[in-house]
Amino acid sequence: MTLDPYRRTRRRLLLAPTTLTLLLFMVLPMLLMGWMSLLAPDTYGGVRWKEWSLDAYVQFLYERDLDDSLTLNSDYLQIFGRSFLLAGFATVVTLLIGFPTALYIALKEEKTRQRLILLISIPFWTNLLVRTYAWMLLLRNGGLIDSSLSALGLSQGTLDVLYTPTAVAIGFVYSFLPFMVLPIYTSLEKMDWRLVEAAFDLGANRWLALRRVILPLAMPGIVAGCLLVFIPAIGSYFIPELLGGGKSLMIGNLIQNQFGTARNWPFGAALSFMLLALVLLVMWIYTRRFQRPPGE
Amino acid sequence: MQASNTLWRFRGVTPTAMLAFVYLYLPIVVLVVLSFNANRIATLWTGFSFDWYLKVMDNDNILRATKNSLIIASGATVLATSFATMAALAMAGKRFRGQAFINAMLGLPLLVPEIVTAVASLLFFLALGLDLGLLTVLIAHTVFCIPFAYLPIRARLEGLDPRLAEAAADLYAGPFATFRRVTLPLILPGVLSGAMLAFIVSLDDFVITFFVAGAGATTLPVYIFGLIRMGITPEVNAVSALMLLVSIAFVALSYWMGQRKS
């Protein structure tokens, strides 16, 4: 290795395209976004570059009355709260379905396990927009679920689920279930099952073995899975847009609206920046607690 | 493995897993079935028909959007995979200062919610005065494809015996010859699966493209979104089913390739 005097130069050259691309087109835009959130909006979209203003952040909490006094406005906080609730709900339900599923797969023979994991990952690699659309077909009035339920006499043919938060929750659980199963499976697969055997030998029943041995050992996978569900869910845009019926249901819709009809770029930038800060905070807590970022 | 012992049968595990698989595949199956439906009312089955597929193939807008999608996905795949291969080679060598920073940066596109990346990229392109179009989409896609291409290549390099490259150097192969004749053939499966991931991820992307595409560079997912917003129609069913089948074929292919090399 020491015989190669150009090692350092070569390393720099090899890293240059990736580093420059990410710095220029990922890091710099984020900084710019933070900066623009501190500027005044222009009337038809855009910003006034020389006019500093905290309005975007003030607007998040307060409404400016005609006489320029500020009154508390909880509309946006409610949207953030609802996003938290929906993403949190999706995380809990995917965990409740995902953990048993991962355990089921982990207890199978090697060959079967590989096939089942393929089955879990296929939806993960297929277009999410299209799969969300498929839920519109299933959930709408007169759709498959509605007509089956009314055929069984369980409803009057008016399910009225599509375009409600319930539909969004169903869509979230569906879309992000593989993100929960895969990391939990990975940690279960790496587990030394003799430990569970030892627990059985020592007289533990299934429930005790599950709670005291399997769950603690699967914890890294469970935490990674929760993050992989929660983060994309809270920033989701088109699932609430399509299944929730185009109302400003979640943060993502609110952000998009600032670049569409509302034409308030600084506010859109501020909302994105707050969402980013939230995600980075969660990740920071996670890496402090569990050291490694997910996916490694 | 432990199936013989009844102690290993946890109650409720099998039904939940079955429910999960049904849940994952029911929408896909329903969508594909309905795309062959003869009826105009897209959710009522009346008979088998191929018409909607023919209509889709005949729709200029869909063909144009597909062309854009393929151009962007190919371009982003080539760029991202070459960048990622180079970076992975550098990262696999001796540890160096700044490595943690580069690692963190590589994680960013995976970590940051898509809508945030989308807004940041849009504002950046507009501030630069770039016209939104194929170029801006290509740039944005290359950025988020890099980590997807990087991870499998890096994993492959991790399992590589460093003595092979050393042996090549002992035999007077220069760094480039060593790469071309020894390292590249060995990491090629990683490079290929990285490229495939990048291609699928680019082809499937909606949110970021939606923000940075502008009017001229509509990709297939962006076009489909527009159609869906106008209403549920059999044409949407058909074009959606086509998209699903292409992705599934891709995943199956990469699985098959993975099986063959092991």
Image (tube, coloured by chain):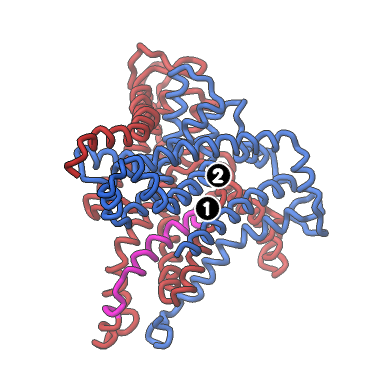
Q: Amino acid at mark 2?
A: Asp
The chain under label 2 reads B
Q: Amino acid at mark 1?
A: Trp
Q: Which residue is mark 2?
A: B204
Instruction: Identify the secondary structure beneath mark 1.
Output: helix
Residue B187 seen from this side: yes
- Our reading of the magenta stretch's main secondary structure is helix
Label the blue chain with its letter. Answer: B
How many numbered callouts? 2
The chain under label 1 reads A
State whether residue B201 is above or below residue B122: below
Quadrant position of the N terminus of chain A in the picture: top left
Q: Residue at x 50, y 37 (%)?
A: B76
Q: Is residue A183 within the magenta segment?
A: yes
Foreground of the two, A72 or B13: B13
State whether residue B258 is above or below residue B125: below
Q: Which residues are magenta?
A: A169-196
Crowdedness near tag 1: few (<14), some (14–19) or many (≥20) residues, C-alpha within 10 Å:
some
Q: Residue at x 62, y 52 (%)?
A: B244
